[in-house]
Image (cartoon, helix red, strand yellow):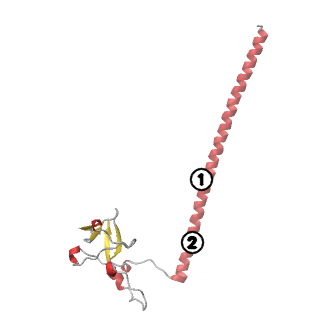
Amino acid sequence: MSTTYRIRRMGWLAALGICIILYILLHLKVTSVHADVVRAEQRIVYLEEQKLLLETEVITRANQVQLAAWNRVDFGFAAPKADQFIDSPRMLASYGAPPMEGAPPPIRLAGMRSAEDVPDFPQLVSPLTGRRIEANLLEEEPGDDGRLAVTIAPGPIRAPIAGVNGVVAEATIR
């Protein structure tokens, strides 16, 4: 091999090395620009979300001003005062009016402490199927409020259960 051939070969290798280095630098620059574009897109999305939140806030506050103006002019509503709150269900019931003529009778729920309180305990009937509830599903342990408990499904549920002859009993399903 001649010296010219070796120099030429080393020149080609140097040119190839320079091209590889330039390719790596170009690739890094493209990756850097791509990362900047992705960050800019994320910032744009963030700013659009903030703009939407601010628009919603402005619309809400404008509606509040409009509602306050309507309240002052048309309705005259005011926040309740401490003496306007009701202490008990009896106090609430005292505000009620007698039923109007032709109104249906109210639904009444009866409660019992135990089966001994009522001499002829009515046979309970399922409101879904119309069949009587088996005696093994009934517990005679009082619930939290001292009433009879009917165990059918887990979880406390208060449900009216229709009895025989239109008698309605209330039971706690546990």
Which disc is residue 63 wearing? Answer: 2
Q: How many numbered tags mark residues here?
A: 2
CA separation in Å, label 2 and label 1: 26 Å
For the residue labelled by badge 2, is the local secondary structure a helix, a strand or a loop?
helix
Residue 71 higher or lower than 143, as above or below: below
Which disc is residue 108 wearing? Answer: none
Residue pictured at 34% horizontal, 85% vertical: 94
Residue 163 higher or lower than 31, as above or below: below
Q: Position of residue 104 (x, y in %)?
A: 41, 86
Give the mark nearer the N terminus: 2 vs 1: 1
Q: Is residue 88 visible?
A: no
Tell which of 84 and 108 is nearer to you. Answer: 108
Residue pictured at 39% horizontal, 71% vertical: 129
Residue 50 higher or lower than 13, as above or below: below
Tell which of 80 and 126 is nearer to you. Answer: 126
Residue 157 horizontal side relative to residue 49, left or right: left
Which residue, given by chain and number where applicable, does mark 1 sit on? 46
The image quadrant where one finds the C terminus is: bottom left
Q: Position of residue 72 (x, y in %)?
A: 53, 80
Q: Position of residue 59 (x, y in %)?
A: 59, 68
Q: Is residue 158 visible?
A: yes
Q: Amino acid at mark 1?
A: Tyr
Residue 48 horizontal side relative to residue 143, left or right: right
Image quadrant assignment for residue 125: bottom left
For the residue labelled by badge 1, is the local secondary structure a helix, a strand or a loop?
helix
Q: Position of residue 31 (x, y in %)?
A: 65, 37
Q: Amino acid at mark 2?
A: Asn
Mark 1 nearby-residue class (10 Å; few <14, some 14–19, many ≥20): few
